[in-house]
Image (cartoon, helix red, strand yellow):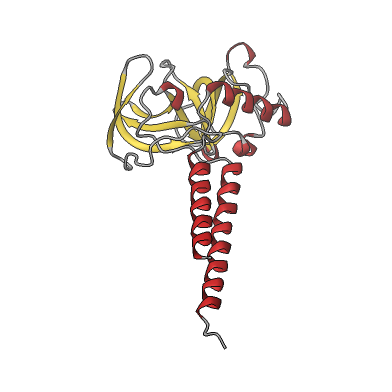
Amino acid sequence: MRHALRLAWLALFAAMLGTLSAPGTTLAYSLTTWSWNEPITLKLVDGRQLEGRYRGVSGRVSDADSYADQYAKWRAEHGADAVPALGDTLLVTPAAGEPLRGPLRGFTNKRLVLGTADSCLGVSLPLKEITQVRLAGERAAAPPFAAHQRWKSAPSLYSVALETEGGAFDVPVWRVASKEMLPHARAGSGTTLVVGVLVAAVLLAGAAAAAMASSFSQPMI
């Protein structure tokens, strides 16, 4: 009986290892990452290097096409009149400071990200600190967007926040060539469910084994 229990435990442990090592729906990077405010150097896909202080990561989408598709779907649900398209040139007026102008790169953790002259850098503004967002350029006559406080539900752009001498910027993850030190992307709900089931199975198996061992340990009458 003990031999059978041992084989069952080994089989369950092997199943757990196989499930946890299987590739998920999101990319996974190192479990060891930089510390907040640590000086770092990001190697970009265009060969450049960016130096600054690490301010964390936002979002969990690591593919540019995937984010664009998710954003288009979200925008369709809210309507083109209520949500700008990716790439639209916007004029954003914050509660304090001068208005900012640039192409929309997306949203990240309740912040709006505007592109800069450097395609690898974006400037993010908290939605709660924005007073007005309107189209710029040829469509500047269009009325301002009135629903920007509801944009908190937008899909979040997967990016690295970096504080440099030139200011604070968001660098899209797909612009980063070396990703070894980036935090792992959050696991999908399917992976979380499987792990939960395995943990429950382990607990049940342990309880059954303990009960069985206890019954065998009772003196025979």
Closest to the observer: 81 or 11? 11
Question: Which part of the image, by quadrant, shows the C terminus?
Answer: bottom right
Q: Is residue 196 above or below residue 92?
A: below
Number of marks in the rendered image: 0
Q: On the rendered structure, is 7 left or right of 44?
A: right
Name the residue at 35% across, 29% down.
Answer: 167
Q: On the rendered structure, is 2 left or right of 145?
A: left
Q: Position of residue 90 (x, y in %)?
A: 56, 21
Q: Is residue 105 above or below residue 211?
A: above
- Whether residue 100 is visible here, answered yes or no, is no
- Residue 173 occupies which quadrant of the picture? top left
Name the residue at 36% across, 20% down.
Answer: 44
Name the residue at 60% across, 43% down.
Answer: 189
- Residue 83 occupies which quadrant of the picture? top right
Q: Position of residue 151 (x, y in %)?
A: 62, 35
Q: Is residue 137 above or below residue 186?
A: above
Closest to the observer: 176 or 82? 176
- Whether residue 184 is visible here, answered yes or no, is yes
Closest to the observer: 43 or 29? 29
Name the residue at 59% across, 23% down.
Answer: 68
Q: On the rendered structure, is 39 left or right of 161?
A: left
Q: Position of residue 93 (x, y in %)?
A: 53, 29
Residue at the top extreme, as displayed: 138
